[in-house]
Image: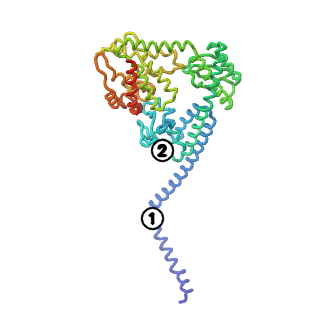
Amino acid sequence: MSFFEQSRYYLNNILPDIILYNLDQINTFLEQWWWIFGLFSLFFFFFMLNIFRQKVYLESKNLEFNTFLQKLSLQTQIKDVEKILLESAKLVNAKYLALYELRGETYILIETNTSTNTDVAAPFRIGKKDIDDFQKSGNYKVYSIANSSQNQMMMFFSFYTFDLKPYYGYFDIMLTYYEQVSKSFNFKGGETQSSLGKSTSSSLMKLQMDKNQFFKFFISLVIKITKAEGVKLFTKEGALVFEQAPSENASLKKVFFIRNTPYKLEFYDTKPLKQETITQVGSFLDMAGGFLVNTDYESETIKNYLSFLRFTNDAIELENPYYKNHSLIVQTISVEIAKSLFLSEKEIDTIQLGSYLHDIGMVGDLLVAIDKEELEEQDMNLIKEHPLIGGIIVEPICHLYPIENIIKYHHERFDGKGYPFGLKESQIPLDAQIVSLGEFYVGVTSDRSYKEGKTHEEAVEIIKDLSKKMFNAVVVDAFLDIEKSLKTKIMKIKAKKD
């Protein structure tokens, strides 16, 4: 049989049988195992659907980030940028966010929205090498991301597991923008504001304007610049200071907080504010903040009252031989801890004054009660009032020297067992936590009529044991970093005084 005939025979007789046989086998398989084919088809469908959903989700996120970046780029004031950055936690479904700045090898907390929540607390400082180890805070998982320069960092607190890598580029842009605005304000705007503040303040003093006249002058300038329908000036606590009443048709358009002052300004108009107007008003208020602060700091009344408080504090110490050096040593310890935490000069200045006056509420019968070996309940109740009394005493100068928190909260404990309010953890302001440790050290190392004081080394060990109990571990670590040099400084103070 020729090859041609063999091929024809194969195509006409054998191949059809093979095809029919295979089709029959497939049919039999499908009849017996149809569900496997169905599952495979279903799996393939959901696999493709998941890829599609991820693509849509990423496109949606990209759009969300782009909109957020556009919003951020319109801000030129550092506080406004910080506020918007804190809102970026929502972009990755995180609950809270903390913003950090690198100083040396340590990141220092700049701003956070966790302070009102007792279940989570952002560390005040964290070393670059320690970031990876900090993965949980309370019930929250912790994620961090730094910009390409490593100078700025965000720390996210979330109930959920998520991946930051796909969004690194966006957060890098955000943090870098914040870094540039911060530098611009600190090195250019700050110097300009200070210079303008001093010169204008001097002119106002020559005109002998009183506070009411200055506010009238200040608001008339805002009205003239913006052509607003009305402006109201309040303290940050809500007390009305001065106003040009808005018309009935005007509504509140924006609230401006005046940097470095205890004031806020409400802006009323009949039409929406343009972005250039917001920028213009913000720049003017930053400059005006310099006027207000300088004018107030020159007040003879403020100067005299501050001198009176210092004199009173010194007189209190003279009345009790066991309190000699007390305020000065607490101040020395507190300031050195603040420096170890890389706090700003303004924060250190506040701690310097607040730590010196921390016991200004120790007046009258309190001085007798504190030196008793065994305190009765009425004595303890009396002692617990001194932070509140002190807070009232310093209130008249707190708009310039914000030391009230130190006075009121320096006896609160990290574990919530302190007084007078029983605050705990992040509820206690950092400056008060620092002064609390300073006063504790002085208390345990000082002699009393009923006990001999501990040595420096003994006090250090006690403070170590009270970390995360009485004191924030971050504050304790900062104290331990400088305790040896502190010992020398304290010995010099005692030697000089004696």
Q: Earlier in the sequence, mark 1 or mark 2?
A: 1
Determine whether 135 is above or below 375 in the image.
below
Cα–Cα span, label 1 and label 2: 44 Å
Which residue is more in the foreground, 373 or 223?
A: 373
Which quarter of the figure has residue 117? top left
Total marks shown come to: 2
Q: Height in image: 29 above or below 393?
A: below
Residue 74 position by quadrant: top right
Q: Position of residue 359 (x, y in %)?
A: 41, 17
SS state under label 2: loop
- Mark 1 is on which residue type? Glu
Residue sticking out furthest to the bottom: 1
Place of residue 181 in the rendered image (x, y in percent of width and height, measured from the top left): 60, 35
Residue at numbered disc 1: 31
Name the image quarter holding residue 173.
top right
Which image quarter holds the C terminus? top left
- Residue 377 seen in the figure: yes
Q: Which residue is mark 2?
A: 162
How far across and how far down the image is residue 229, in percent? 69, 21
Image location (x, y in percent) of residue 172: 56, 43
